[in-house]
Image: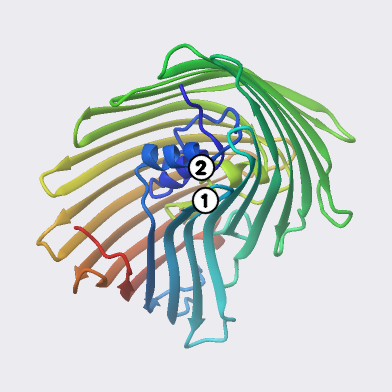
Amino acid sequence: MTAKRGIAGCLRWLWTLPFLFLPTAASAAVEPAAGPETFLEGLDETGMLPGFRFRAGFFSSDNITRAEEDEIDEVASVAEIGGNWHSVGTRFAAAFDGTLSYRHYMQNDFDDEGRANFLAVGDIFIVPETLDWSITDRLANAPVDPVATTSPINVQFVNVLETGPRLTLRPGSNELTLAVSRADIHAEESPIDHARNSGTLGFMHDISANSGFGLVANVRQIEFEPEAEATDFDQEEAHLTFESRNDTLFLSVAGGKSRFELADGPSRDATTGWLRVRARRTSDSVIYAAIERTASDTATAMLTDELLLEQGGVPSFIVTGDPFFSDRLILRYTRGWRAHEWFLALNATDLDYFVSPLDREHRGAQLGAEFMLSPRLLLSLSASGTRIEYLDLAQSDTVRSLQTEADYRINRSWSLVSGLSWLERDSEDSGYEFDEMIVSLFISYSPQGSDR
């Protein structure tokens, strides 16, 4: 069995970005050294092909600041670049996935702003398949007020840049990996800037061409800037892992221990691990299910998960210097029917922070469908609901959303995209209640075209 390697592993993560309610199903074990062959193997495994799109247009909101009172109408022009891209050479490979956009607010005095959610990865093959140097950068937006939703008055950039070498040795059917890295984390507003030094030691044994087991140990040291409102801490964890995959089934199981230790405070440890299954029942239906308990922090979550994305208008990830434990149960079913597709996703998440009073429970559901009404017209519909209970704040929120989008293909490269969305939040704290209606119209260009 070939474990996920370098950029190939990142690409498996990139491929999951459209599934907003799911974590990556790839093994979170270890990142062996990469080379051109394993990078291309990763592309084949994900089915990811280079793609690029540019969109420009307008959207109108009847409550741009998402306020319960004194609602403000706004029209904004938007330019957006997105999609995915990769390049593979004998000594270097790179990949990119995500979106970058620029917003110009036309009616009120809001500053123009950028929005982003992208991951860029690069590998230098010093000794192909044995020694490489990786660089990873994740840029995203997050709310400044951790309980409120993002808006022109409550948004910031958060960036994580990580780099370091990996050494992989392969005696027989075994694989030994040693990796070290340094990550720098910067938030535009929140005082949590810090550096993270990491070391990973992994051993994998191939049982067959499609399955294997191993032991992975990670050590992380987090050091905050002097002006940061957080305490330095260390993390150690070790897991036994098993992974098996074939054309119809992917299975990943892990179990172990994780421990956090604050520099000037107590320590906590917990049993962590996961069970993740992805099964293809027919050629057009897929079930994904996962039960997991993980130990994480801001940098780790940004680089390995899509938690930074909002679910139903409520941030499921809060930028903080505080480590946390996360318990999650995820279920998603996707089914194709002729030229159409529908999906159902259920998500339950409990977040337990080390110090912060922002412990909370998420319970969410989403139902969506895509209808190919003609060779040129694609109609997308989705509805979602999320319930959030803030355990230490005596506050609970309920968020509901409806979205529809019509994509009319003018020709192979150009499309006209119109959208209508509604978002409502009920809260025990009236200051966080709001409802918002957004209407949008975009022209979209894709150089490589579309085959739909």
Give the image quarter of residue 265. Answer: top right
* Residue assigned mark 1: 89
Label 1 amino acid? Gly
Upstream in the sequence, badge 1 or badge 2? 2
Closer to us: 423 or 332? 332
Position in image of residue 162 (x %, y %):
69, 48
Residue 427 visible at all: no
Question: Does residue 184 sit above or below 326 in this rendering?
Answer: below
Q: Residue at x 41, y 18 (%)?
A: 209
Q: Residue at x 57, y 81 (%)?
A: 110
Residue 284 visible at all: yes
Position in image of residue 82 (x %, y %):
43, 64
In the rendered structure, the answer to whether residue 145 lies left or right of residue 220 reads: left
Q: Give the distance between the C-alpha atoms of the residues marked 1 and 2, in whole angstroms.
A: 6 Å
Position in image of residue 444 (x %, y %):
32, 72
In the rendered structure, the answer to whether residue 451 lies left or right of residue 103 reads: left
Q: Judging from the image, what secondary structure is the residue with disc 2 in?
A: helix
Contact between marks 1 and 2 (CB within 8 A): the answer is: yes
Label 2 amino acid? Pro
In the rendered structure, the answer to whether residue 239 lies left or right of residue 151 reads: right
* Residue assigned mark 2: 36
Instruction: Specify the quadrant that holds the C terminus.
Output: bottom left
Neighbours of disc 2 within 10 Å: few (<14), some (14-19), many (20+): many
Question: Does residue 69 sit above or below 142 in this rendering?
Answer: below
Neighbours of disc 1 within 10 Å: few (<14), some (14-19), many (20+): few
